[in-house]
Image (tube, rainbow, N blue to C red):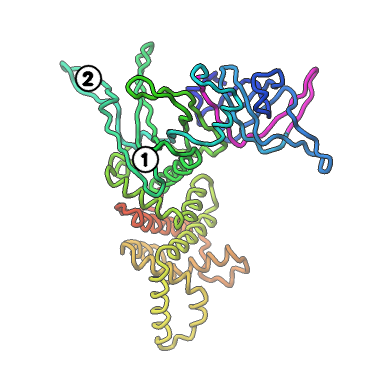
Amino acid sequence: MNKLNFKSYSLDKVFEIKGFFSDQKEDLLSDNMVSGILTYKHDNIVLELFGNLNSLEDEIIGTVKAPDVIYGYTSEGKLLIINCYGFVYGTDHSPGFTLSKYHVKNFKIYDIYYQELDKKFPEIIDYLSEDQIFYYDFSFDNIEQWIGKSVFSKKKVNGELTVETKVSDYQTTKIFIPSRNLYIEDRAIASIDYNYLNLSSRYYLRISNDNDEITFTHCHETACQIKNYIELITGTPLSFTEITFLSQFKLVNEGKRLPLIKGKYFFQHNRDGKIWEKYKYEDITLNALQDNFEEIMDQWFTKSEKLDFIIKQYTKNLHSVPYIEDSLLSTIRNLEVYARNFHEEEVRLYEKESLKLRKNKKGSRKKNSHEKDSQLRSKLTFLFKNADSRFKEIVIDSFSGFSYFIDSLIQTRNYYTHGDVKSKYPKLLTDYNKMYEANTVLQRLLHYYLYQELRMNYNFTDFTYHDTI
């Protein structure tokens, strides 16, 4: 395991932090602290202590209780605030001490300029527990490609290629989100390793506001929603790579901020990211969207309540490998929720008109079977009818007619939702290739409408079933 420090700790690495720990903030830097090791892996964070905290054996159920919060002081002088699951999941005994293990939900590590702070640890912890911060920086997989800008430039000088950088020339995009009362801005850092003559760059997004009255929780929720937006428009899972924030500062020369307390945040999460193909998403990068990005984010956050269920289901499927039938059902459900949340009145009107036509149609003796699932039928038909005509053309070309396709979706949804014998569902989709094709069409249809809600241009490229939605 590579030895890292505060600056190099990140969410996509594995590392250990050695230090002393206590469940009482008043005990920091006292002899009552217990030595231990905090091991971070993205899917498993464990705190091992060489001794006991104020843990108690439950007399009724026999399990060992543990504090919800544990405080730590690392060997490098950093402060740790660790949130645990409230139980000891493993104990062992060695000569001279007891070894106890704790599952950790998340933790924050702070780099503190102690010389400039006239506060003791309990006071510092009380201040940090108020959750107030002054800015929140975050990065995620493929952020450089999504931003679509470079902090480096190249040109020929005397016939030779020269690479140069001037961070002050980097053109940032700064937008304001009224519904969150926050600014979002992309930033870049360039560095050079003179030993190996390596150039490197780091890109991140900063969340802030004018009054410096923001909380970590508010910013983190905003960052998660921005990440969800990028996952939606690219159809690829993303994971955070670094989250840093400023908790306290001091104004020095010319109004510059001297950080007094900086923090990093770590939590359990999946890492299912994929490396993007070069230029695949160039039309939806931050650089390509430019001024439109502010309008898109305004729509995204304004409509977040209506979109919440759809986005949660969509991103959950991105970060897992669901069976095709489960993925298809999820997509049908998302379209159903979308139609209800955004086009409820139009769908009701369309349903009434369709019902009237069926009643007036001669020889319509199968009215009940048609109306049994009329709500879902009306929603799906309405969405196809009001979308780009190419969606319906694809369905007609790939399946046995549009009406048959809708019947198949309804019967497939009903069978996998309610069970029963397959013979009751003669149009049930059983061929997995057809399920995949149907799911692909429906996902693209969902994308089409979500792009409309965000006022983005949907690029209907040549359709193939092997496209990643």
Q: Residue drawn 42% across and 73% down? A: 348
Q: Is residue 91 magenta?
A: yes
Q: Position of residue 230 (x, y in %)?
A: 40, 44
Q: Is residue 202 left or right of residue 78?
A: left
Tell me, yes or no, if residue 400 can be seen here: no
Local packing at callout 1 (Cα closer than 10 Å; few below 14, some 14-19, many 20+) is some
Local packing at callout 2 (Cα closer than 10 Å; few below 14, some 14-19, many 20+) is few
Q: Position of residue 26 (x, y in %)?
A: 66, 25
Relative depth, front residue between 91 and 110 = 110
Q: Quadrant of residue 41?
A: top right
Q: Residue drawn 49% across and 47% down? A: 318
Q: Which residues are magenta?
A: 90-113
Q: Kindly indicate whether the residue at mark 2 contacts the one at mark 1 (C-beta within 8 angstroms).
A: no
Relative depth, front residue between 363 and 194 = 194
Q: Is residue 86 left or right of residue 236?
A: right
Relative depth, front residue between 44 and 303 = 303
Q: Position of residue 340 (x, y in %)?
A: 45, 65
Q: Residue drawn 80% across and 39% down? A: 58
Amino acid type, label 1: Tyr
Dot placed on the residue nearer the N-terminal end, 1 or 2: 2
| Residue 161's disc number | 2
Q: Quadrant of residue 450?
A: bottom left
Residue denoted by label 1: 183
